[in-house]
Image (spheres, helix red, strand yellow):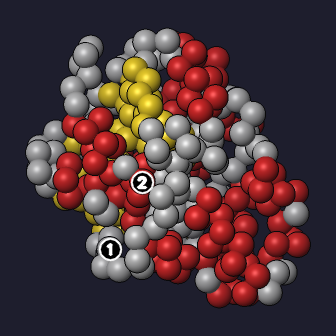
Amino acid sequence: MDWVLGEEFQTPDGVVRWDTLGSGDPVVLVHGTPYSSLLWRDIAPALARTRKVYFFDHLGFGQSEQREGQDLGLAAHARNFAHLLDHWRLSRPSVVAHDIGGAVALRTLLLEERNYRDLTLFDAVSGGAWERGLFQLFLDHEDVFRKLPGYAHEALVASHLRHATHLGFRPGVLDAFLAPWRGESGQAAFYRQYSRIRQADTAAYEHLLGGMSIPVRIVWGREDRILPPPYAEWLHERVPHAELHWVDGAGHLLQEDAPGQLLAHLTADFPSA
């Protein structure tokens, strides 16, 4: 699948790959795990008709550098994101964040003290008790999962990816998401990044959510099995001025299940903007 990030940004732990499309007011797209900026392949070009769109692969993901010893915790991802915003000279971009990208965007806003024009969070890790299920097993048994035979690892990752979409992937998409996690180094990278993200890194800013003054939009798939609807309600209760929108018939990956509806939300004006 033809999705190449042509730019590089050097962090202390390796190279982050990024790129842009379009021109106009800036909007930054932040992906989650175990995905990459490939999730934005339909959304970014559509937004780029009227805006300058920035997208990147987190360190340890996609086309960015993967190696042992990297700091891949949410705090580190937030620091990298803050430095990327500085590198791009963006003082008040719109930010759109999904999955752990939500936690990264919130830490960058609330703890790294970067400013946004507005923030859209969809099917996003934001806080509360999200260390659970398969993710909890990854945290507790990283060494065991690293030792899985390659075929078993690939089957597990494929199943995990399929679990995130309610309607299924289009041809070739699942294979493209699997590619960075294949082979001995990819398998190690997959469990390494999961073992570094911790609930404590979202608990650190939860008390600040109610003080957010920028426009916030929450969008959620009603069929999300990774972060079910109560997680959207948890976030909405703590950011009381935020809009909350439900997308019926869609799971965790709105980019795959309902790209048109997601794009409609991303191009709609914020009432208070």
Of residues 170 and 89, the one drawn nearer to the viewer in this rendering:
170
**Is residue 115 visible from the viewing direction of this image?**
no
Q: Earlier in the sequence, mark 2 or mark 1?
A: 1
Image coords of residue 86 (percent x, y): 35, 45
Residue 195 seen in the figure: yes
Q: Mark 2 against mark 1, which lies toward the viewer?
A: 2
Asked which quadrant contains residue 134, the reply is: bottom right
> In the figure, is residue 189 to the left or right of 94?
right
Question: Viewer-proximal residue, 71 or 248?
Answer: 248
Could you tell me the amino acid type at mark 1? Trp
Relative to residue 250, is residue 183 depicted above or below?
Answer: below
Quarter that holds the N terminus:
bottom left
Q: How far, Cα to Cα, is label 2 from label 1?
A: 20 Å
Residue 178 percent location from the top left of the image: 55, 76
The residue labelled by disc 2 is 257
Q: Nearer the viewer, residue 174 or 48?
A: 174
Secondary structure of the residue carrying numbered label 1? loop
Q: Residue at x 52, y 54 (%)?
A: 166
Above or below for 152 versus 22: below
According to the image, label 1 marks what residue? 3
Mark 2, other Cα within 10 Å: few <14 / some 14–19 / many ≥20? many
Which residue is found at the position 69% from the left and 50% from the top? Answer: 197
| Mark sitting on residue 219 | none
- Residue 235 falls in image quadrant: top right
Circle 2 — which element? helix
**Which residue is rendered at x = 50% and y = 73% of the image?**
174
Residue, x 41% and y 28% (percent of image)? 245
Q: Position of residue 129 (x, y in %)?
A: 75, 33
